[in-house]
Image (cartoon, helix red, strand yellow):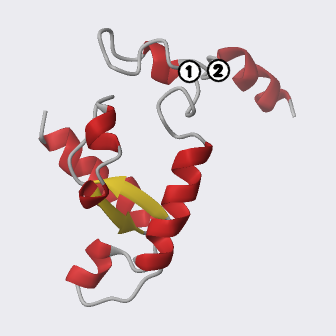
């Protein structure tokens, strides 16, 4: 129990980490997903896309059949709402592929 108490004192709050992580980022000052464009309209469009494209694109490329649960932007939109809403720029991914492969690709692009 005492280990948890001492660890708690060393943890930093993470609430605004996206808003302050990268100075000059399009995310700066946008502390909620809704402010970044992921609002109710997005949720409806996302569900529609997943209904039409239910399988993970990356898993399919490797010969696996995996249900997708994430709609990702092929080209990162970086706050550009034209790119954000371009449905031809959307792909369905499963959570593991989105969290690993896609993130690695975006990190290498910088």
Q: Position of residue 22 (x, y in %)?
A: 34, 16
Q: Quadrant of residue 83?
A: top left
- Residue 33, picture quadrant: top right
Residue corresponding to mark 2: 11
Whichever of callouts 1 and 2 sits on the residue coming sooner in the sequence is 2
Q: Is residue 104 above or below residue 56?
A: above
The crowding category of the residue bearing disc 2, from other C-alpha atoms within 10 Å (few below 14, some 14 to 19, many at least 20), is: few
Secondary structure of the residue carrying numbered label 2: loop
- Coordinates of residue 40 in the picture (x, y in percent): 62, 45
Left or right for 40, reference 2: left
Q: Give the vertical position of 61 relative to 90 (above or below).
A: below
Q: Is residue 48 above or below residue 110?
A: below
Percent position of residue 79, x then y: 33, 28
Name the image quarter holding residue 21. top left
Q: CA distance from mark 1 to mark 2?
A: 20 Å
* Front of the two marks 1 and 2: 1
Question: Which quadrant is the N terminus positioned in?
Answer: top right
């Amino acid at each position: 129990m005492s280990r948890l108490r001492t660890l708690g004192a060393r943890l930093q709050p993470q609430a605004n980490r996206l808003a302050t992580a990268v100075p000059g980022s399009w995310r700066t000052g946008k502390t909620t997903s809704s402010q970044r464009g992921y609002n109710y309209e997005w949720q409806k469009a996302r569900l529609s896309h997943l209904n039409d494209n239910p399988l993970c694109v990356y898993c399919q490329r490797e010969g696996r059949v995996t249900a997708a649960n994430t709609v990702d932007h092929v080209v990162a939109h970086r706050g550009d709402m034209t790119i954000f809403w371009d449905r031809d720029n959307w792909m369905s991914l499963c959570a593991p592929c989105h969290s690993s492969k896609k993130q690695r690709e975006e990190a290498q692009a910088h």
